[in-house]
Amino acid sequence: MTSTLSGLPLAVQTFGLLVLSNVFMTFAWYGHLKHLAHKPWLVAALLSWGIALFEYLLQVPANRIGHAGGYSLAQLKVAQEVITLAVFVPFAVLYMNQPLKWDYLWAALCLVAAAYFIFRS
C-alpha cells in the first residue's frame, strides 16, 4: 500500500486512509440498522464483520504509515475520533435520515479542542 501512496504527503496518506476506513466502519457498525433490522442479529453481525475487514485493510496501513512518519499514538487516536464524527454526521443525516442536531456541533468543537491540544508542540 505504501508504494502506491508514497508520492503523496504523509498527512494525505495517513488521514486519507483513515477517512476511507471510517466510511467502511460506519457502514459496518450502523448500516445494518437500516437494511437488516428484520434479519437475525447473527446475519447482521456476519455481514458487518465482512465490511469491517475492508476497514482494517485501510486502517492498519494508515496507522503504520502515520506512526512511521512521526505521528504519536495519541495523535493518531484523536485524529481518528475527529474523522469518526466527520464521517458519522453526514452518514446519520443523509443515509440514515436522522435529524441534524446542535449536539453534533458541540461534540465537533470538543474534538477540535482535543486535536489542538494533542497536535500542538
Image: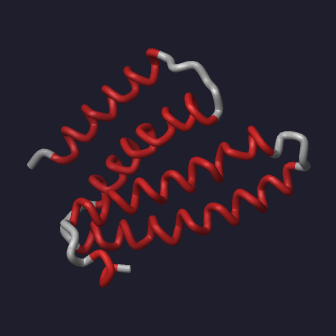
Residue 88, position as x, y percentages in the image: 51, 38
Instruction: Residue lying at the far left in this picture: please name it.
Output: 121
Determine the residue positioned at 20% across, 71% down. 69
Which color scheme did the rendering employ for the protein?
secondary structure
Determine the residue positioned at 71% across, 57% down. 48
Instruction: Residue lying at the far front in this picture: please name it.
Output: 94
Q: Quadrant of the N terminus?
A: bottom left
Instruction: Residue lying at the far bottom in this picture: please name it.
Output: 3
Task: Please state the total of marks drawn on the protein image.
Answer: 0
Q: Looking at the image, which is closer to me, 19 or 4? A: 4
Q: Is residue 67 above or below residue 106?
A: below
Q: Is residue 45 above or below residue 2?
A: above
Residue 62, position as x, y percentages in the image: 37, 67
The quarter of the displayed image where residue 46 is located: bottom right
Determine the residue positioned at 82% across, 45% down. 36
Determine the residue positioned at 19% across, 39% down. 117
Residue 52, position as x, y percentages in the image: 62, 62
On screen, residue 9 versus residue 79, left or right, reads left
Q: Looking at the image, which is closer to me, 45 or 72? A: 45
On screen, residue 87 versus residue 2, left or right, reads right
The quarter of the displayed image where residue 53 is located: bottom right
Q: Is residue 79 above or below residue 114?
A: below
